[in-house]
Image (spheres, coloured by chain):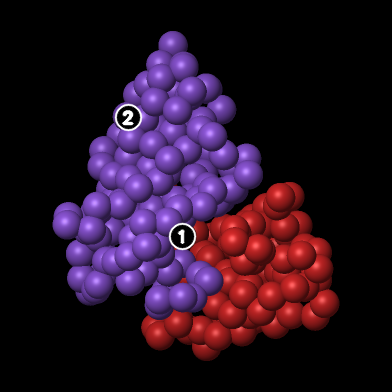
Chain colours: A red, B purple
Amino acid sequence: QSALTQPASVSGSPGQSITISCTGTSSDVGGYNYVSWYQQHPGKAPKLMIYEVSNRPSGVSNRFSGSKSGNTASLTISGLQAEDEADYYCSSYTSSSYVFGTGTKVTVL
Amino acid sequence: QVQLVQSGAEVKKPGSSVKVSCKASGGTFSSYTISWVRQAPGQGLEWMGRIIPILGIANYAQKFQGRVTITADKSTSTAYMELSSLRSEDTAVYYCARDRESGSFDFDYWGQGTLVTVSS
């Protein structure tokens, strides 16, 4: 199972919006509405930010939103803040297993 | 308040095995799936496998088939991940993670991670 493809890095200024893409295949991202997104700060465990493509867990800022079109899912962070600087990973369920994305480093300029 | 607490760091020789534990508190242990995810230094996340304690059934990523064993002890609410035939490429932080709700396909609760270093 190959990792989902994400851009290595995305940057933006405070207050701006950025979007991270996550491209898979019809066997994972395109085949299930079970795409989730995780935020990871250095030395910390990942944190669930979005589940089932576009749902936010309780406590996650509404500045984070998710969507999917075909085999590509996206995470948008609006009103970028310094605390959003972290690594982000997408994940998809796929036939009794899971695959993660390659990861995207978000830098707040 | 769900918490997953993992065992401490390990240093292992190539060819040996390591067993990492993950003790859950808060919530009903057996009803949720526990997955194991690893992260090599400077690398991304990699799903290794999972177990449904109430069924005692585990399934594994193809990459780790035959080398990883995930078990669960319902009496102590503890899940275990054993990786054998260790090689230097297995040096990583190993996380346990629980699904957000029973039957969901995402991971809402994570252990603190256990660093396993494989070195001769």
Q: Which residue is identified by label 1? A: A46
Determine whether B27 is above or below A85 in the image.
below
Find numbered disc 1 in the image and state the secondary structure of the residue it sits on.
loop
Q: Quadrant of the N terminus of chain B?
A: bottom left
Please state if A10 lies on the left or on the right of B19 as rendered: right
Asked whether the viewer can see residue A15, the reply is no
Q: How far across and how far down the image is residue B12, in percent?
A: 37, 21
Determine whether B94 is above or below A78 in the image.
above
Based on the displayed image, in which of its 4 quarters is residue B54 positioned?
bottom left
Q: Which residue is identified by label 2? A: B10
Name the foreground residue: A14 vs B43: B43
* Foreground label between 1 and 2: 2
Name the foreground residue: A44 vs A36: A36
Please state if A5 lies on the left or on the right of B67 as rendered: right
Q: Quadrant of the C terminus of chain B?
A: top left
The chain to which mark 1 is attached is: A
Name the foreground residue: A10 vs B25: B25
Residue at the outermost bottom position = A62
Separation of residues labelled 1 and 2 (CA atoms): 21 Å
Find numbered disc 2 in the image and state the secondary structure of the residue it sits on.
strand
Q: How far across and how far down the image is residue B76, in percent?
A: 17, 55
The residue depicted at 39 percent of the width and 32 percent of the height is: B116
Name the foreground residue: B3 vs A26: A26
The residue depicted at 51 percent of the width and 52 percent of the height is: B59
Q: Which mark is residue B24?
A: none
Q: How far across and how far down the image is residue B40, in percent?
A: 53, 38
Mark 1 belongs to which amino acid? Pro
Asked whether the viewer can see residue A46, the reply is yes
Circle 1 packing at 10 Å, graded few (<14), some (14-19), many (20+), is many
The residue depicted at 48 percent of the width and 24 percent of the height is: B86
